[in-house]
Image (cartoon, rainbow, N blue to C red):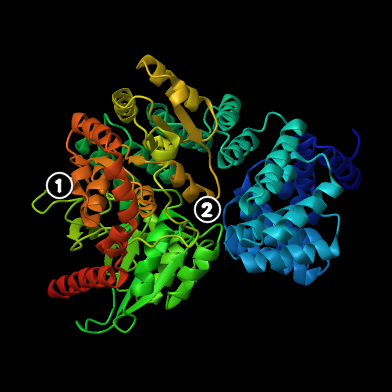
Amino acid sequence: MAQFNIQDAFDLALQHHQAGRLPEAERLYRQILSEEPDDLDAMHLLGVIAYQTGRNDIAVDLIRRAIALDSEFAEAYYNLGNALAGKGELDEAIAAYRRAIVLEPNYADAHSNLGNALKGKRQFDEAITAYREAIALDPNLANARLNLGVVLRSQGQLEEAIAIFRQVIALNPNAPEVYNSLGSALKQKGELDEAIAAYRQAISLRPDLPETHSNLGSALKDKGELDEAIAAYRQAIALNPNFPEAHSNLGNSLRDRGQIDEAVAAYRHAVAIRPSFAEAHSNLIYSLYFDTRCSQAELLAEHRTWAERHADPLKTLIRAHENDRDPNRRLRIGYVSPDFHAHPVGRFILPLLAAHDHKQFEIYCYASVLYPDSTTARIQRHADVWRNIRTLSNEEAAKLIREDRIDILVDLSMHTAKNRLLLFARKPAPIQATYLAYPGTSGLDTIDYRITDPHLDPPGSADERYTERSIRLDETYWCYEPAMESPEVNRLPAIAKGFVTFACLNNFCKNSAAAIQTWCRILAAVPNSRLLLYAAIGSHRDAVCQKLSESGIDPNRLNFVDRVPFSQYMQQYHNIDIGLDPFPYVGGTTTCDALWMGVPVVTLGGQTAISRGGVSILTNVGIPELIAESPDQYVRLAADLAGDLPRLTHLRSNLREKMRMSPLMDAPRFARNMEKAYREMWMTFLSAQ
């Protein structure tokens, strides 16, 4: 019988290992250890195989035993770090990688994997340093470059991230995951055509990557190509039916196309796949506001489910607040939003911030803005303290707010995109309120108040539909500041054209079937009139034309406007005689813009706050006669107005001045009302202590 030769066995084991024949290598390593229990290399490499096969506990034990035999073994520390990272023990992994680097400073792979572990701990600056060191040691280390680009993109350093992804592509032009990362950075920068090209290149190299199809869909959606976006999402789902992000993204595009039922179904599918997917669940809730069949009870129940599932488990993180209880001191108000830019929220919050009494209130803005712009800069100038929390986790942001000793923290997002409700679930401020996103409810019992007005929520109306207490401002929910790009009001277009043009420039998803049917009735009642709608190019335009045809209306009387720069959007009102408010989810910003441009708006007042925005705005402007209480009256008001060109001419000439003189544009008055509400919240808090 041949004598067992340890060296020959190790050489053969190493050949098997390097060739990927792990079972054969493992058998030989174990045989070596049975003959020589303290064989350092066999023990170490047996631990490496355990790591490679997902047995991280065993790997850590074996590699630590190897290190006990040789405490200067840099490669063993490196592999120990890998196994610890595989277990999710990142602090210990970081320590192991650092020890490997101390022993071997030029160990490029150790620097690279240290970067990965630091990235996992959200220590992004240190991760960037580690990746840069790895690349300096080995310029061909593509993974380090790729991961550096990923971290830089997450930190908003897009130019460098894009350059790095392109460097990786130069090293390996056939790597689909790099094109995917490049596409994501380009999309984040707003270079949608280049992003789409990068995603399509990734797909050409690897057609079976569902994530890339979903990312392509998101870029196409941002470009307004909804049909193509939906096709991309459906392809991602075909490749992976259990891909919750793709289902949620599909829901977003279906909602934008006005297919609310289908959008709700897509969101429910996403949540069913991953019940912890708070973002998809928020998308579902927000879409239910557009669903005419969803009752208030059902809507509230879904909000409570969201809170029970996503927010309530975080209550264990709530700590007592140590804010100074002085009733008359200067209060710290914190506003939290991703929309501090040229967005309806940014436009409406700007005059309030500009008019705040900074002697009585210290204003903090917690911004997570993806695309800062000139509006962002204006908002920032009106804040006493500006905090960029875009790259902070909810826990990190909550810690920062607590350290800032904010007295009243105001959410400006509710369940809209990129909301930070899970920050509010941690209750970093003693008083929390929600305002401006839309007049609904958050569903969180850690948010104490919802800010509204007497027209959205008439006094005496019950708060049972909300989880917060309603605080009614004295006059208006909105404070409007017209954009500097606003053109002058022109002559009534119907006089020159010979026909009346109705329009709704709200987001297309607000155009419910009931609203479109009512607009068809208006067109039938006003011969030769036209209807202008805002809608991205896609099959949903054809669907509206079909509804007109079915109602006996020539589709040629319908025109569409696509997404245009803001100045061109305001110019559209030069072609509009009468605005038609959608329902049940009515307009806000768009109604104010129309009135500022001399275009009267007919609205249908509903029973919910979300359906009474027009009631609030028109009442405050002084034209409540354009508020309908039923669809029949809505049709009659619009038709009567269209038939009275002298009245339309008078309104067009006077609406801008009526807006200017109304509470809607009295920013100091609005700010005092808001500050009175804040002081009331503070005194109520103190009285309960």
Residue at horizontal 34 percent and vertical 48 percent from the top: 591
Mark 2 Cα within 10 Å, few/some/many (few <14, many 20+)?
few
Q: CA distance from mark 2 to mark 1?
A: 42 Å
Pick whichever, 257 or 303, lies toward us. Answer: 257
Q: Which residue is mark 2?
A: 567
Question: What secondary structure is marked by label 1?
Answer: loop
Residue 344, compared with residue 681, is above or below; it is above
Q: Say which of 74 and 393 sits in front.
A: 393
The answer to whether any part of residue 73 appears in the image is: no
Residue 154 is at least partly visible in this image: yes
Where residue 626 sits in the image (x, y, percent)? 22, 43
Q: Would residue 226 be found to the left or right of residue 80 on screen?
A: left
Q: Which amino acid, by three-letter code, is at mark 2?
A: Ser
Q: Quadrant of residue 683?
A: bottom left
Going by the numbered disc 1, the residue's amino acid type is: Glu
Q: Which mark is residue 448?
A: none
Residue 421 at x, y = what percent?
Answer: 37, 55
Near mark 1 (Cα within 10 A), the count class, few <14, some 14-19 or many ≥20, is few
Q: Position of residue 389 (x, y in %)?
A: 49, 65
Which residue is disc 1 drawn over? 464
